């Protein structure tokens, strides 16, 4: 879960995240991140659940904590839910997904009002703030296909917008490495366990949030101030 814009990638990511990731890796390997209550069976979210919202987007790009925190700050975003996409219902739980063998990606489902923010603008934030789209099956200190970069499109328009964004970034040579983001149809979105929901908001001093996710919000505030909802700064 790393910021992506080239200037940030060069200035901070390579210098800071590698060092921070190394420091964080040992305690994360030796102890659970948070106290984990027994997980309820995950449920697939389908369009009727968000009938009160105008549109939804499902994006994956590293740990869903940081993705949620970034997109929740945007004006026009009504709700962000963290969960799993790309695998089956039977294995859509954190412990199993963390094995990297279920096909899922940690994802966010973003419910938004397209009269206030467009899908294309969400993709701008996705590529330039929320994660590093050039990393393959990982994000910073987090390794495995469950942390891959992927756009799960719900319709032909979203698929077109996703491909257009990648083509433009590639043509502009925005990144020094090829974009690794996958584009796939959305088959289902499975809601993650309750303790993962709004994790950064509830745990702002948690070491991982401070070191990895809070800097993303800082870059969002610097690069897209006009997109922030009132009170987000």
Image: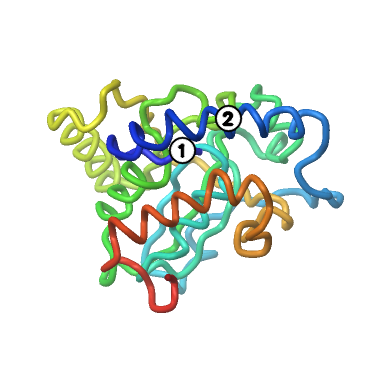
The residue sitting at 45% across, 70% down in the picture is 78
The residue sitting at 63% across, 52% down in the picture is 191
Give the residue number, with chain letter if any, for mark 2. Answer: 141
Front residue (pair 84, 33): 33
Q: Quadrant of the C terminus?
A: bottom left
6 lies left or right of 143:
left
Disc sitting over residue 230 in the figure: none
Question: Image height check: is 44 above or below 137?
Answer: below
33 lies left or right of 10:
right
Q: Residue furthest bottom?
A: 230
Front residue (pair 117, 54): 117
The residue sitting at 27% across, 44% down in the picture is 156
If you read the primary sequence from the N terminus, does the residue marked by circle 1 or circle 2 appear first? 1
Image quarter for residue 28?
A: top right
101 lies left or right of 181:
right
Q: Position of residue 138 (x, y in %)?
A: 52, 26
Question: Image height check: is 38 above or below 13?
Answer: below
Q: Position of residue 108 (x, y in %)?
A: 51, 50
Disc sitting over residue 2 in the figure: 1
Mark 2 falls on what kind of element? loop
The residue sitting at 35% across, 36% down in the picture is 11
Mark 1 falls on what kind of element? loop
Q: Position of residue 20 (x, y in %)?
A: 58, 34
Q: Position of residue 231 (x, y in %)?
A: 44, 77
Q: How many neighbours does mark 2 have within 10 angstroms: few (below 14), some (14-19), or many (20 or more)?
A: some
Distance between mark 1 and mark 2 Cα atoms: 9 Å
Q: Please report contact status of discs 1 and 2: CB closer than 8 Å, yes or no.
A: no
Front residue (pair 20, 136): 20
Q: How many neighbours does mark 1 have within 10 angstroms: few (below 14), some (14-19), or many (20 or more)?
A: many
């Amino acid at each position: 879960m790393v910021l992506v814009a080239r200037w940030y990638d060069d200035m901070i990511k390579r210098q800071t995240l590698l060092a921070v990731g190394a420091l964080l890796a040992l305690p994360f390997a030796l102890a659970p991140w948070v106290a984990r209550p027994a997980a309820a069976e995950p449920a697939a979210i389908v369009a009727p659940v968000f009938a009160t919202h105008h549109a939804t987007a499902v994006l994956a790009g590293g740990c869903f904590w940081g993705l949620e925190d970034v997109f929740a700050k945007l004006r026009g975003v009504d709700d962000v839910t963290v969960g799993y996409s790309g695998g089956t219902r039977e294995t859509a739980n954190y412990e199993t997904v963390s094995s990297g063998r279920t096909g899922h990606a940690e994802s966010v489902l973003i419910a938004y009002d397209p009269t206030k923010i467009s899908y294309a603008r969400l993709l701008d934030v996705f590529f330039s703030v929320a994660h590093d789209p050039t990393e393959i099956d990982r994000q910073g200190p987090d390794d495995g296909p469950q942390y891959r970069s992927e756009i799960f499109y719900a319709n032909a328009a979203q698929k077109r917008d996703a491909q257009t964004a990648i083509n433009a970034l590639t043509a502009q040579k925005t990144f020094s490495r090829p974009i690794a983001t996958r584009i796939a149809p959305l088959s289902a979105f499975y809601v993650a366990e309750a303790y993962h929901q709004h994790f950064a908001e509830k745990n702002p001093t948690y070491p991982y949030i401070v070191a990895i996710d809070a800097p993303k919000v800082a870059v969002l505030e610097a690069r897209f101030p006009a997109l922030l909802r009132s009170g987000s700064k």
